[in-house]
Image (cartoon, helix red, strand yellow):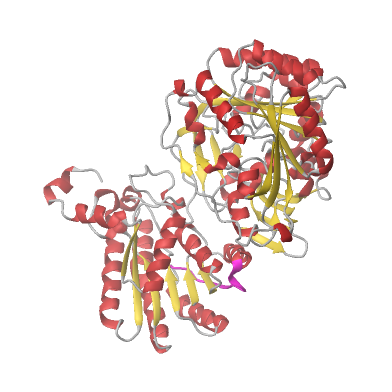
Amino acid sequence: MEGSAPKLPRPRALAGWGRYPIIEGREYEGEELEPLAAGAVLSRGLGRSYGDASLPPAGGHTVLGTTRADRLLAFEPETGRLRAEAGLSLLELNRIFLPQGYFPPVTPGTQYVTLGGMVAADVHGKNHHVAGCFGEYVEALRMCVADGRVLEVSEESEPELFRATLGGMGLTGHILEVQFRMRQIPSPWIWAESERVRSLDRLVAALQTASRTWPFTVAWVDCLNRGRGIAPGIVHRGRWAEPSEEPRRPPRAKRRIAVPFVLPSWVMSRWLARAGSALVFCKHGGRVKRGIVHPETFFYPLDTVLHWNRVYGRRGFTQYQCVLPVSQDGSSYRRFFELFRREGGTSFLCVIKDCGPEGKGMLSFPRPGISIALDMPIRSPHTSELIEVLNELVIELGGRIYLAKDAFTSAAHYRAMDPRLPAWNEVRRKWDPEGRLRSAQSVRVLGDRP
Amino acid sequence: MKAVLFGATKGMGRALARQLAERGEKLFLLGRDASELERSAADLEVRGAGEVGHAVCDLLEPRGFAPALHRASEALGGFDTVIVSAALFAGQEPLEADFVLRDRLLVANFVNTVHFCEEARVRLLAAGGGTLCVFSSVAGDRARKPVILYGAAKAGLSHYLTGLDHKFRRAGLRTVLVKPGFVRTRMTAGLPAPPFAGQPERVARDILRAIDRGWPLVYTPGIWRLVMLAIRSLPRAVMRRVGF
């Protein structure tokens, strides 16, 4: 009832996009976040992080669901400056602003994320090599910190907290509002090119070449192929289309199909993954394809299938994403793929992307090098062992993993990967000395109390 | 359309206001909390509504209804549509246990909502007619154990609105009685969702169509018309045994 104290919601099973792990917890829902923030250990948006980043620690804790707090609060057409509540989804943002000629300066590979989540994970996209992370465009945040105070946080007012919050996985305070700059675009369409490449080395080279002249680049690797080349793939490059190239119709919302129920876990077998992979690469046909495409097709190819995580069944899946510094001879990523294959890894989808320099976020994932993302079905105990082995190589090569995807990395491994952690911890402790804000992931990876 | 919306900062009212804003309608918001009104007005403006005014109006303060509608009329230069989605909600057990809560809910959802509608009716008729769209509930269609008190107030409201339609349609007042089924909003958060639970955006689309076409009654999601037909025709002996 309106006006009464927030009622404790019923416990239910909460999970991230990978449906692993599943944790019994509670989730507040409401249009007003401030009155609910004090009772929650963490904010959670659309739950699109793959592992346990958006989940409360086990033990019936409560998270603050933000998706109903989705109001636009201000927009300046001249500068693109936009302020909105943290639960606003990228889907809604694009629906409203794409026809008006604005687009977020950085977008992840799905629209089913909230602004709060984009800040917490400091997301990157196909333009990381030129644009950096989303946090570079964030001007201010309204936050509720652990002691219940509500603050306007920016580079000027609270620089430490601001930088610790970009990529801080929601552990430095509840993000209530986000102010950032939208980008003006010449047309709502994308000029896209894609090219099939026969080997991993050539693929990485093609990706890096493309990144010198194109604002959006990414590559898919067929890491199941047993052919001669270790891993052939497709390089995608794109830019906003000029008004002269624009089709007459504005882009319409894409039709979506849905996976109606959770399929049995055996469906996503090695065999099917290989067949699917082959299909993608055969469908591409000839060497180079180019033309005008719908921005959803280019930025969010998987969003067309709702609930695609159900394909992986009850056991769920995980995505392993790491970034590796590139050595002159390219041995780092080659060693990674060789190890992955030797250890029996299976991945239907493998995406690589060259990353630009580190940004403002104290704990943000990207660093110069090549980012590799692999989707894999969970097969215990094999998956956790595989990730342990991969992590050891990533540590040796001086890379690190992306917390928004992670469900398995140990505290020791994470510490070894990220020398920035102590500095970030210090800021976090200053704002939350009692360690009130925490997640299932922070218990596992940062050693927080459960 | 020049529309006054009472209770559009949240839930289904919010979703409906957004769809009106995207069509470029002129809007004025009434609600209990000034800062919430301001934020919702900003949201609607960015979505295309032009300037959105607002005034504080509390369902528990009926003396404020006339001045609030007067302010809306001044800001919009007269209005032709009034949409009421403001209401209170509480479960049956808390309402049985707490006199104050029960009194507030019954008064707000029936007595005061009727008072507000009467104020709106007089103004709309004086301006030559218009649309009065009010959210009641399927809970008013048949008494059910978990929503006896809430449902009783909604049943009274539905009865009143049906009467308005009978008496004033000819004079130009189009009364649209909205009966939402189970819709996923903050009001129902934490309740176990039955089959056919609706999303606020979908519900808002149905209501907007009913407003545009002047339908006197709309169940939304539409399947609830059939669900309630079935529930209304269940024998008393069955209703005594089942839990819903």
Q: In which quarter of the image is the C terminus of chain A?
A: top right
- Number of numbered discs present? 0
Furthest residue toward front: A286
Q: In which quarter of the image is residue A131?
A: top right
Seen from the viewer's position, the closer of residues A308 and B124 is A308
**B183 on left or right of A129:** left
Q: In which quarter of the image is the N terminus of chain A?
A: bottom left
Verify whether residue B53 appears in magenta.
yes
Residue at image coords 26%, 46%: B244
Seen from the viewer's position, the closer of residues A399 and B233 is A399
**A252 on left or right of A219:** left
Seen from the viewer's position, the closer of residues B36 and A302 is A302
* Residue A431 in picture, x, y percent from top left: 74, 38
Q: Can residue A86 be seen in this view?
A: no
Is residue A142 placed above or below A11 in the rendered structure?
A: below
Is residue A86 placed above or below A385 in the rendered structure?
A: below
Furthest residue toward right: A328
Q: In which quarter of the image is residue A99?
A: bottom right
Seen from the viewer's position, the closer of residues A321 and A54 is A321
* Residue B210 in picture, x, y percent from top left: 37, 68
Q: Can residue A251 be seen in this view?
A: yes
Furthest residue toward top: A342
* Residue B215 in picture, x, y percent from top left: 33, 71
Residue at image coords 67%, 18%: A410
**A212 on left or right of B124:** right
Verify whether residue A393 appears in magenta.
no
Query: Residues in magenta?
Result: B48-59
Is residue B178 placed above or below A394 in the rendered structure?
A: below
* Residue B55 in picture, x, y percent from top left: 55, 73
